[in-house]
């Protein structure tokens, strides 16, 4: 006490601080008074009562700690608030514009920390790690579902904040779209750091001002530029918390966030990361990455001594029952120790069981004793929880089933369906919904939905406000209720296919009933960004249910059976015929135009041939052709996009009356869509381009800036940009699973690989640079960990094998050839193969990836007499087909059958500039100097002409996607995307349209082939 009073001897000007100090001194005095009688006991009594006294002393120490913690929390909060108050308005404006996850910080939401006196050993261990910067930089709290990871993370966040160490926190949740989005974790953390540390803010704010797109970079770029660089420059020591990382949407085999973290933690040694997550494969894989494994301390929560966990759960249950007893006097002395023992055995170390039990028993509308008796009578279960079999009487399944049965009573077939529908909509929604929104989508009354949800309140986080989102109390409940092997009572089992279909029907019905033109009353002829109160207008005029329906209806199209019902198909057709453009308006206003692409593309894949499919395809063409207009300006959907539709477009015929009266193109429009889906203008020629194996991405390397752009293959939008660091011609290749992208080429010092989800460079192996050999080809091993390159070092071929993960070239071979290499190397089982032309035949050579032995010749194939190695040629490895040109002809030779599969003169009279096969050999494509693309398709008779596309870009280099559905054409000025399955209309040739005095150009079509010109008499004309 004396020491504390001396420490507080100074008198601050802050009156509130004086009061806080006085309160803390009084609390210390009270505890000191309780300790004094224990120390004054005679020695024999002290010995006899040591055990009881030790327990009391421990309790008093906890009280001391709690008092200090409360003081520090208030003090730190005041400091933080003063710091936030000192942020200049200009800085605050910049921080507010960075896209972040809402309520992801520890102090937001309704999260609860550990009950006083519980989890003491675990919390102490983590706190010691946080304070000791000689400990590993990363701490992984590893625990099964329900073991209390998030509760511990909340308490650690509070304690570290009270100590002044907490820099930022991000509590992930799959129930919220933004808090399960990997792309928002690092920007959210960076903004919190900027608000908490002036030194960090002084670096971060100018960075974001100079490059606002930084926050949208790859995960690697975000971590590097938004967090690591400002932390290094500011020299801050801090702790960052990421809770429930397993709840983020992540397609990587090893967590993308952890992959990036592993590459940077050693560069910021004054910063520590506390991470919690279930031991799922991708989380385990992330922490096993070499760079992260050596920097991580792991604590396995479900391996803690069971007796310690049980003591904490018993304390939690006792406290919960005491709180109930304070509200109801007749509960004194309840429950019995035997009843507590029973609940403790059932909990089996799962805190979520204890928490749900207290919520269930303590609901204000029920008798607590009857609720407890109900649980005590419930059957035991032996279901598996994850991959670990819990004790037969200790799973969550019996608890959840008991709560459901108690809530909804006896069988009622009509009400059972409504129960399942309500729970299904809540659980299967793409993001959290409120009771009122669920009611709107399902066509139920809001009151009935709220009552059903209230009946199972102990399993949910449910507010009194019907417009507030409702979500499961713990994610183990959704896991239980959708699994028929766990939720064995059919009354409550939620079958995802049928309930997705129900929500889909509700979304379509709502859009069909409520969508109208210009629902947000936006001014005419403006871009969305010019409307200052756009967000407020959307919130005021678009209900949450309608916003959800517009953005997420297609997310309930989980398979073809979902859409193949007369009611759904009819509703979808009615929606597209009557509400399509109004839907695009809403998506434009909400900044979600990309959802239209995904929705229509998915619907087209699931629908069978029908008039509805034709309409879906036409709508898809409209969205793709005018995507930029749709995404940037609601009014110009009508002013610019609709007038430029082809004459025979279904969208045009259905919605032409909605076009602006002054915008009527009377000359120059094509009759129908051509096969072009999208066009991307480029300012510098493309060095190389390649499709991803999954056909979802296109990677391009530009000449001027030597940047690698990863494009969305559906829209040609940039997904991310990688810095190649090269100024030499190079090639790109994707790994078989599309997770990695590798750059190689002569003149490069390294063979470099990037993780596409994180954007981080994962390896850089020393290349063959001594003589700058010309690379011919490369291939990945089937497992995706090895890369083989083929280059020509006259008079030999050089094959090099690289381990991509370890950045090591494992071995290489020089292979003397007497002929000409065809330039292809490919994977065959566990080997790689390449071919050469020697002595009038095609020789196939093979090498094992893991073997140091020289290549062996495995096959000799025939070659036609008219093949000339000096001309353009391509070899398709798996089918052994050789494509080449002669004067006026394009030929494809079947080397196995010794016959021609194609002898075409279609391109006669023009030079073929490039040719390629699709990966499976079904398609063969070539481009000519006349801006023509010829696409041949495999047939029983060989290759037959499938499409002829007339483009408007020069220097065509066409490439067919691996799935055979699309072609990209690379030119000097643009990249064009075409569908191989659509009918082709050649580019319309129109007389040049001269603009007269008094007319002005309204706009151009996306390919700039047509211009819309408004005349003085109000008629808009088009010309090519």
Image (spheres, rainbow, N blue to C red):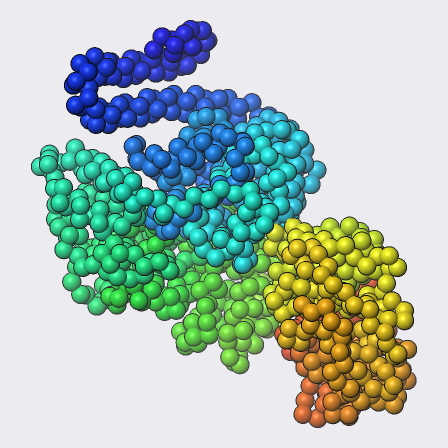
Quadrant showing the N terminus: top left
Report the residue at 45% width, 40% height from top: 103
* Front position in the image: 536 or 175: 175
* Front position in the image: 660 or 888: 888
Whether residue 63 sits left or right of residue 334 in the image: it is right
Q: Quadrant of residue 791?
A: bottom right
Instruction: Give the x, y percent position of residue 625.
Output: 66, 65
Quadrant showing the C terminus: bottom right
Q: Quadrant of residue 110?
A: top left
Instruction: Give the x, y percent position of residue 668.
Output: 75, 70
* Front position in the image: 998 or 700: 700
Q: Is residue 371 visible?
A: no
Q: Quadrant of residue 923?
A: bottom right
Whether residue 700 sits left or right of residue 195 in the image: it is right
Report the residue at 14% width, 55% height from top: 377
User: How many numbered callouts?
Assistant: 0
Q: Say above or below: 51 vs 36.
A: below
Q: Is residue 781 visible?
A: yes
Q: Say above or below: 175 vs 960.
A: above
Whether residue 196 sits left or right of residue 566 in the image: it is right
Report the residue at 77% width, 92% height from top: 898
Instruction: Give the x, y percent position of residue 830.
Output: 64, 73
Q: Residue furthest left?
A: 330
* Front position in the image: 222 or 242: 242
Instruction: Give the x, y percent position of residue 727.
Output: 83, 53
Whether residue 223 sits left or right of residue 835 in the image: it is left
Report the residue at 76% width, 75% height from top: 855
């Amino acid at each position: 006490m004396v020491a504390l009073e001396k420490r507080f001897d100074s008198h601050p000007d802050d009156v509130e601080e004086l009061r806080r100090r006085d309160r803390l001194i009084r609390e210390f005095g009270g505890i000191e008074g309780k300790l004094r009688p224990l120390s004054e006991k005679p020695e024999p009594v002290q010995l006899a009562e040591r055990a009881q006294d030790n327990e009391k002393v421990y309790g008093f120490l906890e009280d001391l700690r709690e008092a200090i913690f409360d003081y520090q929390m208030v003090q730190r909060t005041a400091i933080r608030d003063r710091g936030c108050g000192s942020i200049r308005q200009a800085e605050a404006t910049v921080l507010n514009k960075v896209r972040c996850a809402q309520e992801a910080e520890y102090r937001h939401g309704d999260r609860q920390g550990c009950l006083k006196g519980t989890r003491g050993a675990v919390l102490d261990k983590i706190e010691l790690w946080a304070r000791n910067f000689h400990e590993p930089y990363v701490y992984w709290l590893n625990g099964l579902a329900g073991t209390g990871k998030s509760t511990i993370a909340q308490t650690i966040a509070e304690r570290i904040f009270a100590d002044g160490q907490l820099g930022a926190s991000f509590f992930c949740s799959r129930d919220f779209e933004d808090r399960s989005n990997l792309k928002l974790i690092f920007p959210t953390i960076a903004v919190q750091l900027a608000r908490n540390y002036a030194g960090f803010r002084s670096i971060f704010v100018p960075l974001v001002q100079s490059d606002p797109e930084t926050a949208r970079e790859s995960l690697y770029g975000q971590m590097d530029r938004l967090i690591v660089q400002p932390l290094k420059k500011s020299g801050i020591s801090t702790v960052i918390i990421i809770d429930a990382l397993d709840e983020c949407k992540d397609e990587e085999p090893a967590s993308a966030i952890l992959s990036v973290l592993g590459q940077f933690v050693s560069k910021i040694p004054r910063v520590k990361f506390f991470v919690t997550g279930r031991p799922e494969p991708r989380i385990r894989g992330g922490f096993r990455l070499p760079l992260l494994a050596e920097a991580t301390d792991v604590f396995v929560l479900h391996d803690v001594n069971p007796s310690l966990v049980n003591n904490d759960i018993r304390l939690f249950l006792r406290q919960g029952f005491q709180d109930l007893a304070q509200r109801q006097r007749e509960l004194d002395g309840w429950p019995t120790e035997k009843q507590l023992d029973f609940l403790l055995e059932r909990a089996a170390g799962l805190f979520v069981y204890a928490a749900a039990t207290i919520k269930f028993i303590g609901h204000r509308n029920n008798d607590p004793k009857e609720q407890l008796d109900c649980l005590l009578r419930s059957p035991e279960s032996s279901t598996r929880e994850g991959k670990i079999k819990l004790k037969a009487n200790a799973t969550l399944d019996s608890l959840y089933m008991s709560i459901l049965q108690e809530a909804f009573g006896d069988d009622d077939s009509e009400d059972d369906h409504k129960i399942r529908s309500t729970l299904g909509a809540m659980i299967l929604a793409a993001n959290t919904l409120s009771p009122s929104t669920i009611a709107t989508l399902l066509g139920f009354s809001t009151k009935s939905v709220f009552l059903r949800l209230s009946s199972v309140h102990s399993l949910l986080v449910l507010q009194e406000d019907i417009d507030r989102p409702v979500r499961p109390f713990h994610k183990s409940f959704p896991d239980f209720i959708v699994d028929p092997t766990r939720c064995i009572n059919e009354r409550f089992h939620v079958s995802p296919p049928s309930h997705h279909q129900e929500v889909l029907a509700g979304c379509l019905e709502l859009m069909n009933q409520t969508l109208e033109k210009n629902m947000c009353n936006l001014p005419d002829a403006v871009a969305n960004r010019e409307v200052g109160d756009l967000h407020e207008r959307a919130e005021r005029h678009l209900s949450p249910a309608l916003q959800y329906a517009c953005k997420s209806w297609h997310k309930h199209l989980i398979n073809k059976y979902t859409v193949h019902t007369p009611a759904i198909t009819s509703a979808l057709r009615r929606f597209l015929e009557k509400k399509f453009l109004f839907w695009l308006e809403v998506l434009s206003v909400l900044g979600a135009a990309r959802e239209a692409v995904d929705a229509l593309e998915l619907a087209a894949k699931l629908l069978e041939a029908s008039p509805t499919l034709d309409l879906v395809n036409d709508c898809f063409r409209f969205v793709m052709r005018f995507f930029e207009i749709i995404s940037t300006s609601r009014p110009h959907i009508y002013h610019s996009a609709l007038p430029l539709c082809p004459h025979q477009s279904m969208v045009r015929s259905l919605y032409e009356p909605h076009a602006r009266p002054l915008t009527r193109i009377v000359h120059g429009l094509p009759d129908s869509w051509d096969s072009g889906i999208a066009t991307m203008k480029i300012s510098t020629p493309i060095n190389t381009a390649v499709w991803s194996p999954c056909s979802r991405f296109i990677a391009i390397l530009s000449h001027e800036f030597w940047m690698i752009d990863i494009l969305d293959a559906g829209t040609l939008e940039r997904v991310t940009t990688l810095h190649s660091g090269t100024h030499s011609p190079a090639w790109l290749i994707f790994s078989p699973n599309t997770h990695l992208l590798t750059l190689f080429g002569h003149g490069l010092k390294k063979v470099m690989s990037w993780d596409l989800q994180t954007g981080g460079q994962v390896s850089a192996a020393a290349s063959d640079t001594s003589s700058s050999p010309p690379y011919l080809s490369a291939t990945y091993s089937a497992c995706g960990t090895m890369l083989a390159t083929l280059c020509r070092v006259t008079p030999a071929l050089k094959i090099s094998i690289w381990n991509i993960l370890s950045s090591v070239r494992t071995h290489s071979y020089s292979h003397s050839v007497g002929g000409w290499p065809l330039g292809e190397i490919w994977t065959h089982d566990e080997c790689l193969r390449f071919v050469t032309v020697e002595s009038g035949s095609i020789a196939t050579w093979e090498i094992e990836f893991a073997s140091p032995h020289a290549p062996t010749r495995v096959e000799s194939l025939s070659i036609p007499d008219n093949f000339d190695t000096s001309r353009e040629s391509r070899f398709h490895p798996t089918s052994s087909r050789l494509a080449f040109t002669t004067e006026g002809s394009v030929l494809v030779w079947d080397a196995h059958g010794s016959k021609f599969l194609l002898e075409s003169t279609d391109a006669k009279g023009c030079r073929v500039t490039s040719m390629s096969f699709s990966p499976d050999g079904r398609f063969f494509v070539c481009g000519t100097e006349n801006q023509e693309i010829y696409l041949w398709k495999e047939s029983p008779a060989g290759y037959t002409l499938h499409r002829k596309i007339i483009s408007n870009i020069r220097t065509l280099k066409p490439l067919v996607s691996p799935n055979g559905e699309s072609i990209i054409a690379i030119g000097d000025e643009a990249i064009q995307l075409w569908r191989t399955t659509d009918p082709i209309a050649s580019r319309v040739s129109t007389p040049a349209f001269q603009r007269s005095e008094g007319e002005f150009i309204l706009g151009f079509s996306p390919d700039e082939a047509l211009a819309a010109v408004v005349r003085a008499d109000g008629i808009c004309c088009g010309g090519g």
